[in-house]
Image: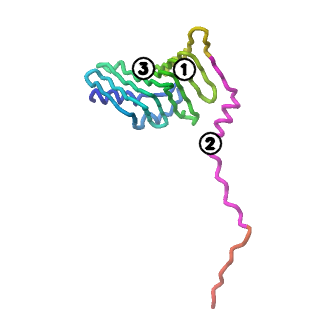
Amino acid sequence: MNKHNLIIAALLCITSFSGVAKQDDLLQEVKISAASQEADIKNNQMVFNGPVEVTQGSIRILADELRASSKEDGGGRILVAIGKPATYSQIMEDGRPASASAEEIRYELSNRTLTLIGNATLEQDGSQVKGNMIRYNIAEQRLIAESKGNDRVITIIQPENYQESSQEERKDPEPKPDPIPTQLPEIEQEKQ
């Protein structure tokens, strides 16, 4: 696999901040749409200038700029989406949407860590965490949120009945049966 493909392969490993992300997403092709692209193949770096849209299955990242880099040994692959804000969204295995936004969304593949920096928000089922920095280790399912100065970390947790009702709204309604005819059809009789 050449260096360019290693960077693109890194995008295949994008996952959500929940342990129940759709597994099918990771089997889908990665599509990057950008206004322009620069590649420094010798140094394993690519920059996509925006607006940038990355899609893979239900995963969608929108940014003003996307930087992808990896070290020679393949152990240090990093994706950085930058925007005002950059956004990340995905449909989870149970059909629930999850999203994140920040001025910088950084995904370190070697330690499976998603870091949101600057006006960071993480949301699922109406519940959310907001702070200056949110770090989520996907493998360990550990979240750390921090703020700076007098700002506070804000966590909003929706009651279970909100989550259940919003999940029911996403289900397709059962098909309605055909209406019962109010008139009998005319029967043609054979002429003899």
Which marked residue is nearer to the observer: mark 1 or mark 3? 1
N-terminal of the pair, mark 2 or mark 1, is: 1
Q: In this image, 10 relative to 89: left or right?
A: left
Give the crowd class for mark 2: few <14, some 14-19, many >=20 residues within 10 Å.
few
Residue holding disc 2: 171
Q: For the point 50% across and 25% down, which residue is it?
A: 84
Please give the name of the residue rendered at 53% of the width and 16% of the height, measured from the top-left corner.
133
**Which three-letter amino acid code belongs to the residue tagged 3?**
Glu
Residue type at mark 2 is Lys
Q: Which residue is mark 3?
A: 108
Marks 2/1: CA–CA distance: 30 Å
Q: Regarding mark 1 in the picture, which secondary structure is present there?
A: strand
The N terminus lies in which quarter of the figure? Answer: top left
Extreme bottom residue here? Answer: 192
Which residue occupies 28% across, 26% down? 3
Alpha carbons under labels 2 and 3: distance apart: 34 Å
Name the amino acid, label 1: Ala
Q: Where does the magenta region start and end? A: 154-181
Which is more N-terminal, label 3 or label 1?
Answer: 3
Residue marked by disc 1: 120
| x, y percent for residue 178 | 67, 60
163 in the magenta segment: yes
Where is the C terminus found, in terms of image quarters? bottom right
Magenta-colored stretch includes residue 26? no
Rendered image: mark on residue 130: none
- For image coordinates 38% across by 29% down, the residue present is 49
181, 99: nearer the viewer: 99
